[in-house]
Amino acid sequence: MKLQLLPFLGLLSALSYTSAAQNLICYYDSASYLRQGLAKMFKSDLELALEFCTHLVYGYAGMKAGTYELFSLNVDLDMFHYKEITSLHQKFPHLKILLSVGGDHDVDDAHPNKYIEFLEANRTVQQNFIDSSMILLKRNGFDGLDLAFQFPKNKPRKVHGSIGSVWKKFKKLFTGDYIVDPQAEQHKTQFTDLVGNLKNAFRTANLMLTLTVLPNVNSTWYFNVNKLHPQVDYINLAAFDFNTPLRNPEEADYTAPIFFLDEQNRLPHLNVEFQINYWLQNHCPANKLNLGIASYGRGWKLTTDSGLSGLPVVPGTYGPAPGGLQIASVEGLFSWPEICAKLAKNSSAVYRGENAPLRKVTDLTQKYGNYALRPANEEGEHGMWLSFDDPDFAGIKAAYAKGKGLGGMAIFDVTYDDFRGLCTGQKFPTIRSIKYFMG
Ligand SMILES: *[C@@H]1O[C@H](CO)[C@@H](O)[C@H](O)[C@H]1NC(C)=O
Ligand SMILES: *[C@@H]1O[C@H](CO)[C@@H](O)[C@H](O)[C@H]1NC(C)=O
Ligand SMILES: *[C@@H]1O[C@H](CO)[C@@H](O)[C@H](O)[C@H]1NC(C)=O
């Protein structure tokens, strides 16, 4: 037995040596600078994370409707903050700093489809975007541009629950009228052309170009993998938020499972493995892919119809759980330190009621994710179900990415990690765990 095992172990360590994941892409939402209280992150907090990050992605810039120039979504902040952040080059010479455009943050109610309209525009108009990007990036000392392009999203799984009508209007708000792009094929070609033109311009200017595939943007529809991967430095797959309380108000499920759990009519593409394999099967080199994870969790409100077990798929939920003080503008979103503060430290604690802690359920299979819950009380109040990647599960995903030979990991984003060390005293536990398991 020993004799057989030894060469096998040798092979394993050789493999893990050559396939060591290198990249840790850290997204940084500059809006965190404007948050209140404990959520406000200063440059000094950020610097601690940069010991671990290879790339810092500054989020987010926008694209101006009509002229399609790259522009700052918050001029008052950015006009100083861009340079403040890129000046981190001096302290961290290894660090690449990119500016990201889109990222689901460029919300323009008057022009909800401007990214698609831009693709359909002529070459002259597209040149505006290319030229304005190069000027903005160079003037502010960025190393390149990250295209977190806002394509129309997959529609969520349909549910025919008793409270369906309540959510009907609400759903429309987030997914349009369920019309998913009839011209997807054309937009795919146009996007490939755009990326080619951007790359040509950026090459001579010595600027990097990277791609972020946003949650629920369907790669089959929009990305010509074969033609895209040679044009970009790397691709970050934001493989999370497959299920969210805003998209799936009436049922709660793992937000970012690694594998497909083929039960209860789950859709086969809503998991990490499917998304990674799609790019690999279409000949994207593994080392150009970074697996993106969220350092926040999503919370649903449980009702008396949701039962007590919490086993997903959880029925009878009622949209986002209230709370989530850090990002008050996104209902049902909880940063890791906020989640940590809600978890029971004591198994004999009460398990229902407003002030009861949430009981954490650890996924011993290490395949789907951890969650925590507090069942609703008899009046149907104070129920909550949270799905999240805690530092442990982030580590499991990092080990998975390494096993797949991927280029590395991307964290969305550093400002939702526990940068104050409120949970266990350790600052940036999610980033540390990822780094540790990437090896
Ligand atoms: C390109 O589109 C813009 C805006 O629609 C238009 O003003 C311009 O004339 C077009 N240029 C060419 C060469 O077609
Ligand atoms: C895109 O959506 C279709 C239809 O829902 C699905 O079959 C396909 O697997 C999806 N592709 C990816 C990469 O998720
Ligand atoms: C656990 O909680 C119960 C009830 O709140 C309390 O009586 C007990 O002292 C706690 N135990 C520990 C170890 O904190």
Image (spheres, rainbow, N blue to C red):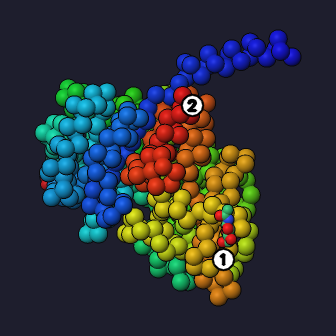
Residue drawn at (15%, 49%) of the image: 80
Q: Quadrant of the N terminus?
A: top right
Residue ID for mark 1: 352
Between residue 405 and residue 178, name the one nearer to us.
405
Residue 198's place in the image compared with 389, above or below, is above
Q: Nearer the viewer, residue 3 or 228?
A: 3
Nearest to the observer: residue 331 or residue 218: 331
Q: Looking at the picture, which amino acid does disc 1 mark?
A: Arg
Residue drawn at 29 percent across, 69 percent down: 109
Q: Disc 2 on helix, strand or loop?
A: helix
Q: Which label sits in the foreground, 2 or 1?
A: 1
Asked whether the residues under the numbered discs 2 and 1 touch, taking CB atoms below 8 Å apart as contact, a structural biologist would say no
Residue 431 showing in the rendered view: yes
Within 10 Å of disc 1 (Cα), the crowding (few <14, some 14-19, many 20+) is some
SS state under label 1:
loop
- Which residue is at a point 62% across and 64% down the rendered structure image? 344
Q: Nearer the viewer, residue 198 or 213?
A: 213
Which numbered circle lies on residue 402? Answer: 2
Residue 37: where, in percent of width, then height?
A: 33, 64
| Cα–Cα gap, marks 2 and 1 | 40 Å
Q: Is residue 158 left or right of residue 430?
A: right
The location of residue 317, given as percent across then percent down, is 61, 75
Three-letter amino acid code at the position of disc 2: Lys
Crowding at mark 2 (Cα within 10 Å: few <14, some 14-19, many 20+)? many
Q: Earlier in the sequence, mark 2 or mark 1?
A: 1
Position of 380 relative to 351 (above/below)? below
x 71%, y 68%: residue: 348
